[in-house]
Image (cartoon, rainbow, N blue to C red):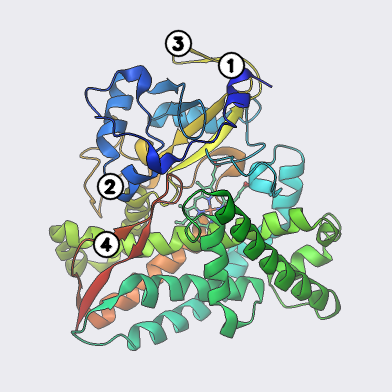
């Protein structure tokens, strides 16, 4: 294990770090892994500097230990595709303080175990199953949008984004619909959105909640062994030769559940909120949409680029490797900042702007590349497409009433709440 990796275990509260000016801080001291920067939407200038001056950059000292920042589109793609050198083990986020509470999940595994486990749950999101989901999603979207009050302020995150993504998750797990908000809660706990102060007590509370999640899903597992569902993921795991014993390794079962819960929850939820926010920020794009609704599929890709719901994925170098003239040592932590790659001005013209008919919107890197490329990408796109098709049928305008409150996280790039008002047609 490299010295760099060992050092990363010293605890520093990232919320207590002193401010750094993005332009004048010496380059080798620049540390972008600060939750407040994301919460205040102030991270852009730091990444712009990194892309320009050091697209492969070493930060020797941060709350999460030393790490490399990969900020340009080209180099992110290179790292993500070179999985034989850049390992996804032991974790895929920069924050690995919780070393005692390890949750194995296939997103954080290398070949061959990764491929075996991915293969098992993948059928749940193949086009044939997505077609089955489509009518359910449309029905639920319609009923949620129909209940929205006319000309009255409400929280879009809670009433629409969370409701839709949580219903979807309950469907793919065959989880009791009336208890669906538990899924939202566990997802928030897993991503650090509930117990947020980084203290040891908070970590323990979070772990206790996640054990409750495991208990509930263990019961569901045993039920599905006897009574298989038609196409839910727990049935698939419980009846597949490769994973049928997963329940006997509770941490692995919990890890994979949380992967699906977080993967399907925060990401899509924040794209839904981000789409409304961005259309309000760039009002002429809202006009474009009103004039031509056939732009919705491209707009969905553009919104996912613009929002980048997961700001980064992290890797660990398995051997010494040179990238852009810099020597990355075996054991070093390497962070691919998708949030920066998606705003790389050498790939996306006027990158900070939402442009719903952007020609190369689909080249975004929000879903990653290579063997870990997002498994739920089509499902997420379908949910967003249906949301906007149905919203356009009903509303002249979804008006954002003030700045949303953003997540305090360097991983999930999202919103806690956003007040809106709708004008019905
Ligand atoms: C806009 C929505 C979404 C975004 C931006 C997103 C983003 C990502 C990213 C960045 C990765 C890792 C890619 C890499 O390391 O190269 C990933 C992997 C994954 N995502 Fe998503 N995701 C979204 C929606 C979903 C949904 C709806 C589901 C499930 C129902 C899902 C399930 C997964 C799973 C299981 C993996 C692990 C794949 C693997 O390791 O092979 N995601 N996602």
Which residue in the protein does label 4 denote? 404
Q: Nearer the viewer, residue 8 or 331?
A: 8
Q: Nearer the viewer, residue 166 or 202?
A: 202
**Dots 2, 4 in contact, CB < 8 A:** no
Q: Earlier in the sequence, mark 2 or mark 4?
A: 2
Q: Earlier in the sequence, mark 1 or mark 4?
A: 1
Q: Nearer the viewer, residue 283 or 407?
A: 407
**Ligand 1 neighbours mark 4 (CB distance < 8 Å):** no
Q: Nearer the viewer, residue 23 or 97?
A: 97
Give x and y (percent) for residue 39.
33, 50
**Ligand 1 neighbours mark 3 (CB distance < 8 Å):** no
Which residue in the protein does label 1 denote? 329
Give the position of the C terminus as an image quadrant.
bottom left
Marks 1 and 3, how far apart in space? 13 Å
Which numbered circle lies on residue 325? 3
Q: Earlier in the sequence, mark 1 or mark 2?
A: 2
**Is residue 113 shown left or right of residue 170?**
right
Marks 1 and 4, how far apart in space? 40 Å
Q: Nearer the viewer, mark 4 or mark 3?
A: 4
Q: Residue placed at 60% from the left, 76% from the top? A: 171
Q: Element under label 1?
A: loop
Q: Earlier in the sequence, mark 4 or mark 3?
A: 3
Which residue in the protein does label 2 denote? 41
**Ligand 1 neighbours mark 2 (CB distance < 8 Å):** no
Question: Visible in this render: residue 345?
Answer: no
Marks 4 and 3, how far apart in space? 40 Å
Up/down of 326 relative to 257, above or below: above
Give x and y (percent) for residue 192.
51, 54
Q: Nearer the viewer, mark 3 or mark 2?
A: 2
């Amino acid at each position: 294990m490299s010295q760099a990796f060992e050092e990363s275990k010293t605890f520093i509260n990232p919320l207590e770090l002193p401010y750094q000016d993005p332009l004048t801080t010496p380059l080798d001291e620049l540390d972008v892994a600060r939750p407040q920067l994301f919460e205040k939407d102030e991270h852009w200038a730091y990444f712009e500097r990194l892309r320009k001056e050091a697209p492969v950059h070493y930060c020797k000292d941060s709350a999460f230990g030393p790490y490399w920042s990969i900020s340009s589109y080209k180099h992110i793609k290179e790292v993500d595709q070179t999985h034989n050198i850049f390992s996804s083990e032991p974790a895929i986020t920069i924050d690995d303080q919780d070393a005692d509470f390890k949750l194995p999940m296939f997103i954080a595994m290398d070949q061959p175990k990764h491929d075996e486990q991915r293969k098992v749950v993948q059928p749940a999101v193949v086009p044939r199953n997505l077609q089955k989901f489509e009518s359910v999603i449309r029905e639920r979207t319609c009923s949620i949008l129909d209940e929205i009050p006319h000309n009255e302020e409400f929280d879009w995150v809670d009433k629409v984004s969370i409701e839709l993504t949580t219903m979807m998750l309950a469907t793919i797990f065959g989880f009791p619909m009336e208890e669906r908000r538990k899924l939202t809660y566990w997802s928030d706990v897993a991503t650090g959105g509930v117990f947020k102060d980084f203290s040891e007590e908070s970590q323990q509370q979070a772990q206790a909640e996640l054990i409750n999640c495991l208990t509930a899903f263990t019961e569901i597992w045993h039920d599905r062994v006897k009574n298989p569902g038609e196409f839910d993921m727990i049935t698939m795991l419980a009846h597949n030769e490769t994973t049928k014993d997963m329940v006997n390794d509770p941490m692995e079962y919990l890890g994979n559940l949380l992967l699906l819960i977080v993967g399907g929850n925060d990401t899509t939820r924040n794209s839904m909120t981000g789409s409304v926010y961005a259309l309000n920020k760039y009002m002429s794009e809202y006009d474009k949409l009103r004039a031509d609704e056939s732009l919705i599929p491209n707009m969905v890709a553009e919104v996912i680029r613009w929002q980048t719901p997961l700001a980064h994925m992290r890797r660990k170098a398995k051997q010494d490797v040179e990238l852009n003239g810099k020597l990355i040592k075996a054991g070093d932590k390497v962070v691919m900042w998708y949030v920066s790659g998606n705003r790389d001005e050498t790939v996306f013209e006027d990158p900070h702007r939402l442009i719903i008919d952007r020609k190369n919107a689909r080249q975004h890197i929000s879903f990653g590349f290579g063997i870990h490329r997002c498994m739920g990408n089509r499902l997420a796109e379908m949910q967003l497409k249906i949301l906007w098709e149905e919203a356009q049928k009903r509303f002249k305008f979804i008006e954002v009433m003030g700045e949303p409150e953003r997540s305090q996280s360097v991983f999930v790039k999202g919103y806690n709440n956003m007040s809106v008002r709708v004008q019905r047609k």
